[in-house]
Amino acid sequence: MAAAAPKTWTVLDLLRWTTQHFAERGIDTPRLDAECLLAFALGCDRLRLYVDYDKPVDEAERARFRALVRERAQARVPVALLVGTREFWSLSLRVTGDVLVPRPDTETLVAAALDAFPEREAECTVLDVGTGSGAIALALAHERTKARVTATDTSLAALAVAADNAERLGLADRVRFLEGSLFEPVAGERFDLVVSNPPYVAKRDAASLPPELRHEPASALFAGPDGTDVLRAFAAQVFEVVAPGGAVFVELDPAQAPAMSQWFADAGLERVTIHRDAAGRARVVAARRGA
Ligand SMILES: C[S@@+](CC[C@H](N)C(=O)[O-])C[C@H]1O[C@@H](n2cnc3c(N)ncnc32)[C@H](O)[C@@H]1O
């Protein structure tokens, strides 16, 4: 009897099998993750997969893909860390285990901050506290072509990733990177726009968080037992750093929005407003310093 021919795996076979495997493992976006990883393993973009549904995938490509699928399903490594990049505000950012993977929610902050400075060529100064991959700082520098942006972080490793992203996006000449906590690295300076997506997750919730978060730096996520340590310090110190007439925008957990609004008002800031994310949750608190 002739030996059975080895099975030929097509792009579509692999997508179907992996989508089901990811779904059984409790991964939220199984089909999307399967597509991103297969496209990465094959060195093409996701749309190409649809054109190539019936194309056989050779053993070397499958081996590359299998390794990625294992990391995603078993170790629960986020897709962005497996492929090394993440799209944010239509910019492709390099990401590593030293930075928070930029989230779509953070685009709410970028949109709100841009609304406050609607002129594309406005000459403004911007401070991004806790820049991580540089997501917010670079999106703002990209959109406001004359803005001079300062981005700070307590993590030197994160700053190296952010500086590399600035270089790749051709924005390095207008963005400077400084190490230090909160406003320490910019003592004595004032900015028209101060933005931050600081760590705001409650340490007491750590055990119940999705396993993917274990692959991101704890210092980017947690801020004390109830998550407000950095927000509180930020609100208490930010007034002096905002130029008269300037604005401040902070991302947070929706449950923290009322307290943050109060802390901003207590600090002497005015016109405190709340901006909602795509799901309608209070995601950003903003305020102005009187002129
Ligand atoms: C939630 S991540 C945000 C990263 C990035 N801005 C984004 O939106 O994707 C918070 C960042 O703040 C930094 N960080 C934590 N505590 C800080 C502090 N006291 N001062 C400045 N940066 C801090 C962390 O290292 C991390 O990179």
Image (tube, rainbow, N blue to C red):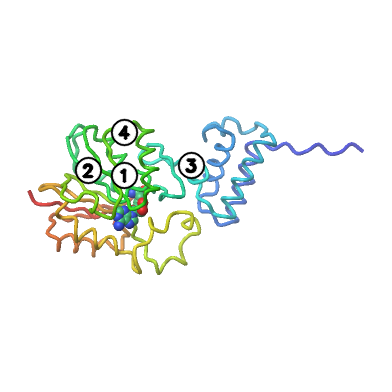
> Counting other residues with Cα less than 10 Å from the Cα at mark 3, is it few (<14), some (14-19), or many (20 or more)?
some
The residue labelled by disc 3 is 84
Q: First in sequence: mark 1 or mark 2? A: 2
Mark 2 element type: strand
Determine the CA span between mark 2 and mark 4: 14 Å
What type is the residue that disc 4 sits on? Leu
What type is the residue that disc 1 sits on? Ile
Determine the CA span between mark 4 and mark 3: 20 Å
Q: Residue at x 36, y 42 (%)?
A: 162
Q: Quadrant of the N terminus?
A: top right
Residue 239 point in image, percent of width and height: 15, 55
Find out whether the residues at labels 2 and 4 contact each other: C-beta distance under 8 Å: no
> Counting other residues with Cα less than 10 Å from the Cα at mark 4, is it few (<14), some (14-19), or many (20 or more)?
some
Q: Is mark 4 within 8 Å of ligand 1?
A: no
Residue 30 point in image, percent of width and height: 55, 49
Q: Is mark 1 within 8 Å of ligand 1?
A: yes
The residue labelled by disc 2 is 126
Determine the CA span between mark 1 and mark 2: 10 Å
* Residue 212 versus residue 202 in the image, above or below: above
Q: First in sequence: mark 1 or mark 4? A: 1
Find out whether the residues at labels 1 and 3 contact each other: C-beta distance under 8 Å: no
Find out whether the residues at labels 1 and 2 contact each other: C-beta distance under 8 Å: no
Q: Is residue 281 visible?
A: no
Residue 74 point in image, percent of width and height: 59, 55
> Counting other residues with Cα less than 10 Å from the Cα at mark 1, is it few (<14), some (14-19), or many (20 or more)?
many
Determine the CA span between mark 2 and mark 3: 27 Å
Mark 4 element type: loop
What type is the residue that disc 2 sits on? Val
Residue 31, quarter of the rendered image: top right
Q: First in sequence: mark 2 or mark 3? A: 3
The residue labelled by disc 4 is 171
